[in-house]
Image (spheres, rainbow, N blue to C red):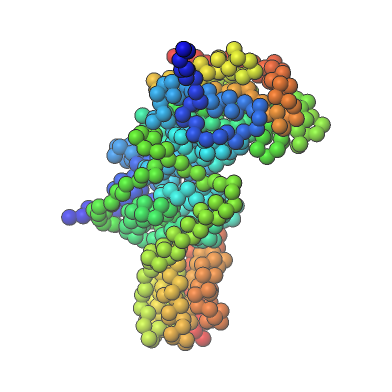
């Protein structure tokens, strides 16, 4: 007789159904972060700070201490929490409109203070929750509901921008369009949380992500588009934790 | 024996907060409130608290949101234009029901205005300022001693009601130096089982000023309103001076104007006029019932509202009195402080003529 044994299950931290669209990388990223937190046995040490956008509903399915921040301000809220709980592990989870648009001020200053927190930055080059408007990271030529004849200016490269500062400890851009990239992304999450546990300072992981709904693509087509994004947003470690 | 010290209003507020057990302060420089930031920079870390000079007003209030969510006694301070920037987050803190203390040392507006004393942000602080149906407990000290005492008191109120408390002063209060007693009191620390601290051995805590389901958000609003009605019943605070059967005119004024009104009362008495004062110490909840009592039961009494604004608190006095014909207004704008002499002249020439 073969004995059935469960070798893999959904992280217990995730207590409810995802509210994300089918094929969206938010689900993958949420699951990866939850898996890493569980594997490092950090469930009771975590405080999550959630930005505004599609991720604002995360409080509904994350079984850790969690707070919703005003639009763009997650890193300031995380700073307040970290300074009164320096022994806890604090992460922010923010999209590109939240972090690189309305929250650019906090993105630069939190990084420049070397605040010992971790930021997970989900860059899909579009405002998802509001239905597909131009983001600061929208690729040239992309059509959105607010740039019918193509985007204006050039997309902001957050990792490259933060690399100009001396304070951040760890800066890494990853993607999720293949199993190999997903494994790399998981390792980056782990390295970022380790950096924080070892008081290395600010860690920043950018996930090149998709938005099949607002890109008006099938999930498979969206993966091809993320690959195209890597020509402009190269996948690499910009700074290794020392 | 309590300690006596010669301090600016801004310094006294900061000292009171430290003695009340402040754990966390974040602020941004702005005249005429900057001494609060500077005082904390020197004294708060020495007492084991966290001091951060934020890169913006918005960052400062959001750091306070985070620290308060973490269970700390948290504070920020600013002046009028800076307060405008903080409003979005204050609205979040109100729905999240987090305790914190915010100091606003008002200056002349609108716009960049000037840096002189003003009271033109009454609407902003007392009536809202941010979005949504929320209230803040608002204290309006009129002396440095009172600023010290009320700041100390504000922490237990904020904790008890899980509400932001505003210390609303003006440039005169912030900058004037007076001898004060640093009264030693004990500020009660209460348990905060709702705070975020990592879900060790308990269910996770969620601080979520957000709900996409209208009926759920309505419930959250109803709970807030119920709390506000309870605060209105128990936390109204005011001072009355020289109000009796003989009083012909009741001045209603707060903060610096309340202090000036006391000089007016003395000068008027020398001229044979019976003038009294109702000085709201809490602007919300407003001492509506007290003003209404005198207006309803003594129909001959007149009211004069004095403010350093175009007339903002007067709207609450009108609601309380219920008869506009009995109410006059004297106001100065743009950072100009009225003198007792000109107020008395106004009373003699126009109000009691």
Quarter the N terminus of chain B occupies:
bottom left
The x, y position of residue B15, in whole percent, is 32, 48
User: Hey, which residue is sitting farthest front in the picture?
Assistant: A1
Q: Is residue A241 left or right of residue A23?
A: left
* Vertical relation: A183 (above or below) B85: above
User: Nearest the camera: A18 or B230?
Assistant: A18
User: Nearest the camera: B240 or A8?
Assistant: A8
Q: Is residue B338 left or right of residue B21?
A: right
User: Nearest the camera: B186 or A32?
Assistant: A32
The x, y position of residue B215, in whole percent, is 57, 53
Residue at 57%, 66% (x, y): give it.
Answer: B310
Residue at 46%, 41% (x, y): give it.
Answer: B206
* Vertical relation: A12 (above or below) B126: above
Residue A149 showing in the rendered view = yes
* Vertical relation: B317 (above or below) B333: below
The x, y position of residue B48, in whole percent, is 30, 37
Q: Is residue A130 left or right of residue A29?
A: right
User: Hey, which residue is sitting farthest left in the picture?
Assistant: B1
User: Nearest the camera: B6 or B234?
Assistant: B234
Residue at 61%, 19% (x, y): give it.
Answer: A175
Res B72 → quadrant: top left
């Amino acid at each position: 007789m073969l004995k059935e044994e469960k070798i893999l299950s959904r992280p217990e931290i995730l207590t409810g159904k995802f509210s994300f669209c089918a094929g969206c990388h938010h689900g993958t990223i949420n699951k990866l972060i939850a898996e890493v937190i569980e594997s490092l046995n950090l469930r009771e040490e975590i405080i999550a700070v959630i930005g505004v956008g599609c991720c604002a509903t995360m409080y509904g399915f994350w079984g850790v201490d969690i707070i919703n921040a005003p639009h763009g301000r997650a890193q300031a809220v995380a700073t307040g929490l970290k300074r009164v709980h320096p022994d806890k592990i604090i992460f922010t989870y923010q999209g590109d409109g939240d972090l690189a648009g309305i929250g650019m001020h906090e993105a630069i200053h939190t990084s420049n203070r070397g605040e010992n927190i971790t930021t997970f930055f989900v860059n899909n080059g579009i405002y998802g929750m509001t239905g597909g408007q131009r983001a600061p990271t929208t690729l040239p030529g992309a059509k959105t509901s607010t740039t019918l004849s193509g985007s204006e200016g050039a997309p902001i490269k957050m990792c490259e921008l933060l690399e100009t500062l001396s304070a951040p400890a760890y800066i890494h851009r990853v993607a999720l369009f293949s199993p190999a990239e997903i494994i790399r992304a998981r390792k980056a999450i782990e390295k970022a949380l380790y950096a924080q546990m070892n008081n290395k300072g600010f860690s920043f992981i950018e996930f090149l992500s998709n938005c099949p709904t607002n890109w008006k693509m099938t999930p498979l087509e969206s993966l091809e588009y993320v690959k195209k994004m890597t020509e402009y947003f190269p996948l690499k470690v910009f700074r290794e934790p020392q | 024996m309590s300690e006596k010290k010669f301090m600016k209003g801004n310094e006294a507020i900061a000292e009171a907060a430290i003695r009340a057990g402040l754990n966390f302060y974040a602020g941004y420089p702005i005249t005429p409130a900057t001494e609060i930031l500077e005082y904390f920079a020197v004294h708060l870390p020495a007492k084991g608290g966290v001091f951060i000079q934020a890169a913006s007003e918005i960052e400062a209030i959001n750091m306070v949101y985070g620290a308060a969510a973490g269970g700390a006694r948290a504070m920020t301070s600013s002046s009028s234009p800076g307060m405008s920037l903080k409003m979005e987050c204050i609205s979040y803190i109100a729905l999240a029901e987090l305790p914190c203390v915010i100091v606003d040392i008002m200056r002349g507006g609108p716009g960049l205005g000037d840096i002189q004393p003003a009271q033109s942000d009454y609407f902003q602080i007392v009536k809202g300022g941010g979005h949504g149906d929320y209230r803040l407990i608002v204290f309006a000290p009129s002396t440095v001693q009172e600023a010290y005492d009320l700041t100390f008191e504000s922490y237990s109120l904020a904790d008890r009601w899980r509400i932001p408390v505003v210390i609303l002063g003006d440039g005169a209060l912030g900058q004037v130096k007076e001898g004060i007693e640093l009264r030693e009191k004990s500020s009660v620390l209460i348990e905060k089982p709702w705070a975020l601290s990592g879900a060790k051995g308990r269910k996770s805590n969620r601080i979520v000023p957000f709900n996409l389901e209208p009926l759920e958000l309505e419930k959250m609003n109803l709970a807030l309103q119920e709390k506000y009605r309870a605060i209105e019943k128990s936390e109204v605070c005011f001072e009355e001076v020289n109000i009796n059967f003989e009083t012909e005119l009741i001045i209603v004024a707060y903060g610096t104007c309340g202090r000036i009104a006391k000089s007016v009362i003395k000068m008027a008495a020398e001229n044979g006029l019976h003038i009294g004062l109702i000085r709201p110490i809490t602007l919300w909840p407003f001492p509506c019932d007290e003003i209404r009592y005198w207006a309803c039961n003594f129909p001959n009494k007149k009211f004069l509202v004095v403010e350093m604004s175009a007339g903002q608190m007067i709207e609450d006095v009108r609601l309380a009195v219920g008869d506009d014909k009995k109410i006059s207004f004297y106001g100065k704008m743009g950072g100009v402080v009225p003198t007792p002499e000109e107020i008395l002249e106004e009373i003699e020439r126009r109000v009691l003529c």
